[in-house]
Image (cartoon, rainbow, N blue to C red):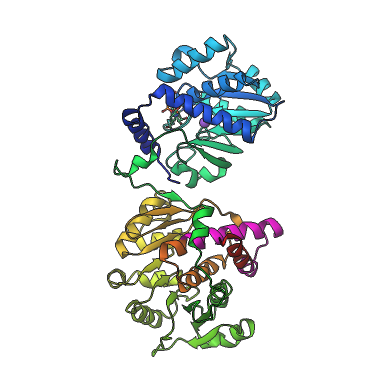
């Protein structure tokens, strides 16, 4: 599924109207109809008390169609207008006229003190938010701010149409206040703002409704739209595991990680690789921690960092970085030089990225794939910008880094973005605060390494890894509470999750 900015949505709308034989009035009818059907099928009970709050733009126009359709089907539905009908324009005005012909004067204007509205919202079981959609610009006006506050104060189940009012569709910022939706029925495509900044906190569960907008025209219009990773894609991306396969078939991961201070990073990364199906995992780390690791993880082969680094000749993927620390720059820089020259897929994570900042040109020249896995702080370091700057432009900076290093980029965050060297992007729509703790990044690198070792292509491996990692963490979080999940519990849950997704 493709994700759009507000501007891209407008261009695709215009294209649909120009070349698809549909006019704006019809598109709005289709949109309102699609939302009313989704509401009836998924949400509304027959005794539901529904209030639809409409603004003066086309989001409000959708609300008039929804109100008409629900009333036609016998639902108890009240319509509130934020502004006098004479302020309506274009197709929103036309749909208000149609509503009014069918249900004459069966609507109310929000009164100045909002007393009637507050009372109605208080008695409602559902509030349908059609105040503002993709047209929001700048700070909210005080009036809309108050209306949104009233909606949020009500205990009714809140459903946003297209997006929660007050949320910026493109950048995910909430300049003032936004409706806290339990659910969002978005039209034609989810908006980029659902996955950026404060967006994820207010959209609730989201569903995208097809309203005949020609999303497929994006390529023709020169748009480079990111896509959302879904269950189906994950299932199709998990490497095939033949029943008669032996350890040689399931790959050999070479993980270079850990230091006396960061033992866990090496342990978690290598165990995540081994416990998600990789045939053999070799860990190169400081010999000072070998005994600790051997007693904890006897399945992992162990070698030491030294100047004459031995390259395991069976390795088919290399991961470099978790828990290296920055105390031995000469040693680690030399190791990175050596492995960069090899023809293996190479994942560079954590402190490995710190060493990679000096190696842009060599990394760019590699013929085998390179995968960089920065979190926002590491992205800021790699691009020499502030964290705010990179976080304000997550899609853009991920693309920029992919281009600079001619690499795949897995940009971690509440909504992780993965980018191919050609700029193609995918977003992971799931994941929560269960993942917000030390060790989970090392587990992700281990899983990614394992999938590559088992034969996945880089993009598929990244798609599967981020999604399975987030889904497994949410599941552990549900069991233990998000305060408590440990990296070990996450590792245990990975293999189970992978099993659930195998076709
Ligand atoms: N996706 C589609 O193909 C379709 C989407 N539809 C719906 O149309 C809206 C977008 O409509 P638009 O008229 O462009 O904008 P809005 O209704 O979101 O908002 C305009 C409205 O808002 C006021 N406004 C703007 N900024 C502020 C502010 N800071 N404070 C207060 N008020 C503000 C402005 O004055 C206007 O009155 C989209 O989201 C969908 O819901 C189509 O119906 C079908 C096709
Ligand atoms: K809305």
- Along the line of sight, the residue nearer the viewer: 446 or 138: 446
Above-or-below relation of 73 to 278: above
Please say whether residue 123 is visible from this viewpoint.
yes
Report the span colored magenta.
463-492
Assess whether residue 482 is covered by the magenta stretch.
yes
Above-or-below relation of 308 to 68: below
Please say whether residue 131 is visible from this viewpoint.
no
Q: Main secondary structure of the magenta part?
A: helix
Q: How many marks?
A: 0
- Asked if residue 80 lies left or right of residue 210, the reply is right
Above-or-below relation of 45 to 325: above
Q: Identify the residue shown where x is 49% and y is 59%.
A: 236
Above-or-below relation of 232 to 172: below
Q: Could you say where residue 2 lies in the image, as x and y percent from the top left?
A: 42, 45
Q: Residue furthest front?
A: 244
Q: Could you say where residue 84 lies in the image, as x and y percent from the top left?
A: 50, 13
């Amino acid at each position: 599924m493709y994700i759009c900015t507000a501007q891209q949505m407008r261009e695709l709308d215009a294209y649909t109207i120009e070349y698809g034989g549909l006019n704006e009035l019809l598109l709005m009818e289709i949109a309102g109809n699609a939302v009313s059907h989704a509401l009836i099928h998924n949400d509304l009970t027959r005794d539901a008390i529904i209030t639809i709050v409409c603004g003066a733009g086309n989001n409000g126009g959708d609300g008039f169609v929804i109100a008409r359709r629900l009333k036609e089907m016998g639902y108890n539905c009240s319509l509130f207008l934020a502004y006098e009908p004479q302020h309506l324009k274009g197709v929103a005005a036309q749909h208000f006229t149609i509503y009014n012909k069918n249900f004459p004067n069966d609507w109310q204007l929000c009164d100045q003190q909002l007393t009637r509205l507050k009372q109605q919202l208080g008695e409602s079981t559902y509030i349908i938010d059609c105040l503002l959609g993709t047209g929001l610009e700048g700070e909210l006006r005080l009036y809309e701010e108050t209306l949104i506050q009233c909606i949020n104060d009500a205990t009714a189940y809140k459903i946003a149409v297209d997006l929660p009012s007050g949320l910026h569709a493109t950048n995910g910022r909430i300049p003032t206040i936004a409706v806290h939706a339990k659910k969002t029925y978005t039209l034609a495509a989810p908006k980029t703002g659902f996955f950026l900044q404060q967006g994820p906190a207010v959209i609730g569960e989201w569903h995208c409704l097809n309203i005949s907008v020609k999303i497929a025209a994006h390529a023709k219009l020169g748009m480079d739209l990111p896509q959302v990773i879904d269950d189906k894609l994950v299932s199709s991306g998990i490497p095939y595991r033949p029943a008669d396969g032996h350890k040689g078939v399931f790959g050999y991961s070479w993980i270079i990680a850990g230091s006396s201070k960061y033992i866990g990073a090496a342990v978690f990364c290598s165990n995540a690789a081994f416990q998600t199906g990789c045939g053999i995992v070799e860990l190169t780390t400081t010999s000072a921690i070998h005994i600790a690791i051997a007693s904890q993880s006897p399945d992992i082969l162990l070698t030491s960092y030294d100047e004459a680094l031995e390259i395991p000749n069976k390795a088919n993927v290399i991961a470099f970085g978790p828990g290296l620390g920055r105390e031995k720059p000469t040693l680690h820089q030399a190791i990175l030089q050596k492995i960069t020259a090899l023809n293996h897929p190479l994942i560079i994570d954590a402190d490995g990225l710190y060493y990679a900042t000096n190696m842009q040109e060599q990394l760019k020249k590699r013929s085998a794939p390179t995968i960089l896995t920065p979190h926002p702080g590491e992205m800021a370091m790699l691009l020499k910008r502030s964290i705010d700057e990179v976080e304000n432009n997550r899609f853009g900076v991920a693309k920029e880094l992919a281009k600079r290093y001619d690499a795949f980029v897995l940009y971690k965050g509440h909504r992780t973005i993965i980018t191919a060297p050609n700029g193609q992007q995918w977003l992971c729509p799931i994941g929560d605060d269960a993942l917000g703790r030390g060790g989970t990044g090392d587990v992700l690198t281990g899983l990614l390494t394992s999938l590559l070792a088992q034969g996945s292509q880089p993009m598929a491996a990244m798609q599967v890894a981020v999604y399975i990692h987030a889904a497994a963490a949410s599941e552990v979080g549900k069991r233990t509470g998000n305060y408590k999940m440990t990296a070990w519990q996450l590792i245990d849950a990975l293999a189970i999750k992978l099993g659930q997704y195998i076709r």
